[in-house]
Image (tube, helix red, strand yellow):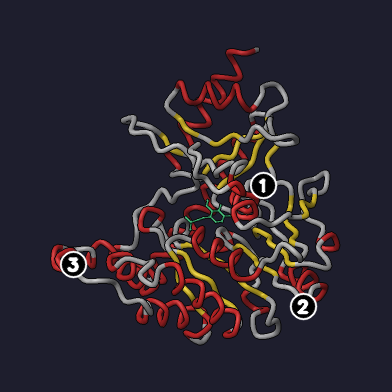
Amino acid sequence: MSRFLNLRLERLLPYTPGEQPKIPGLIKLNPNESPYPPAPGVLDVINREEAAKLRLYSDPDATNLTAAIAAHYGVSPKQVVVGNGSDEILAFAFAAFFDPAEKLLFPDITYGFYPVFAEVFGLAPTVVPLKEDFTIDPSDYTGGNVVIANPNAPTGLALATSQIEEILKANPNHLVLVDEAYADFGENCSALPLLPKYENLLIVRTCSKSRSLAGARLGYAIGHESVVADLQKVRFSFNPYNVNRLTLLAGEASFADRAYFQSCIAKVKATRARLTEGLRALGFTVLDSQANFVFAAHPAETGATLLAKLRERRILVRHFAKPRIENFLRITVGTDEETDVLLAALADILKQRS
Ligand SMILES: Cc1ncc(COP(=O)(O)O)c(C=O)c1O
């Protein structure tokens, strides 16, 4: 730490991203990336001709991409804002809407960036414990701004749309930010149908998971026009060119190919069912995931040990050394072949132990 660091950030603990090691032959089931390539159209638009245009700034209004996203969801382009990953959109939202003088509520076990952003923006959040079964109780979220990941990470559990509506109704004068990074893999949990009714709803989404574009960095938010206008104000105050030229094109091509998108999601869901079943057959407790990962614990072995033993076999999963969840592993749903290798490795690790 230098002598110059803002004192407010002295105790800031930055977010720890999932490892990205360059070990050949690695099975990477740690940061919930897609095992499938981006839509074929994405590969076509990222070409020499477009790369040559990198000397020019990108469109600060992201006009074509914003229109494509708006058309996909049947909303006005004025209800859509794009970001350099949804993390950036989340940062913009924390800056735009949350004030130290107001209550900000989010769960104790959730996406690790929320407490980091709270610290960066000098907020003192009210951290609400999940219930014993790791579900969120909507009635705990009243009298303040709310941030909820739905499906939640790392549990994979989701509230139904009607439960999100309860939270919106209970906080008419506060913003309810619903982070739907994983909602494309869930059933009846998205808050999208609630958009026309609730001015206080902001939905944040990402192209990193269901659209196989994690490395392109593309996220977006959908909300009431006035709320999105506020986010645009913050975006233009930080970086109007926050989404680069190639990513704008990649995003457009992805939204143009609905069939490819749906087929990837169907494959992930089918493999998630196989993975869940396989883990349960090995004695794991597996939460009912609505995301592209599962959260699982074994009664006979600690999460840290399983993480280390899988790593020895070149399989990366994610572990959080946090109270209540230290025995769980968060495992990204990979291909069927990767799932077979993982299940065989876990069976072997557990057999060697007994
Ligand atoms: C709940 C949740 N929200 C947001 C993100 C950020 O996604 P990105 O910045 O890649 O769009 C993640 C990434 O893992 C996540 O798990």
Residue at 18 percent across and 63 percent down: it is 51
Q: Amino acid at mark 3?
A: Arg
Looking at this view, name the residue that lies furthest to the front: 3
**Residue 102 shows which numbered tag?**
none
Q: Is residue 338 visible?
A: no
Residue at numbered disc 1:
155
- From what the image shows, is residue 67 above or below residue 29? below
Q: Which badge, 3 or 2, comes first in the chain's sequence?
A: 3
Q: Is residue 317 left or right of residue 213?
A: right
Q: CA distance from mark 1 to mark 3?
A: 43 Å
Residue at numbered disc 3:
55
Image position, residue 193 (x, y; %) = 65, 78
Q: Nearer the viewer, mark 1 or mark 2?
A: 2
Q: Which badge, 1 or 2, comes first in the chain's sequence?
A: 1
> Based on the displayed image, in which of its 4 quarters is residue 319 positioned?
top right
Q: Secondary structure at mark 3?
A: helix
Image position, residue 191 (x, y; %) = 65, 72
Q: Amino acid at mark 1?
A: Thr
Q: Which badge, 1 or 3, comes first in the chain's sequence?
A: 3
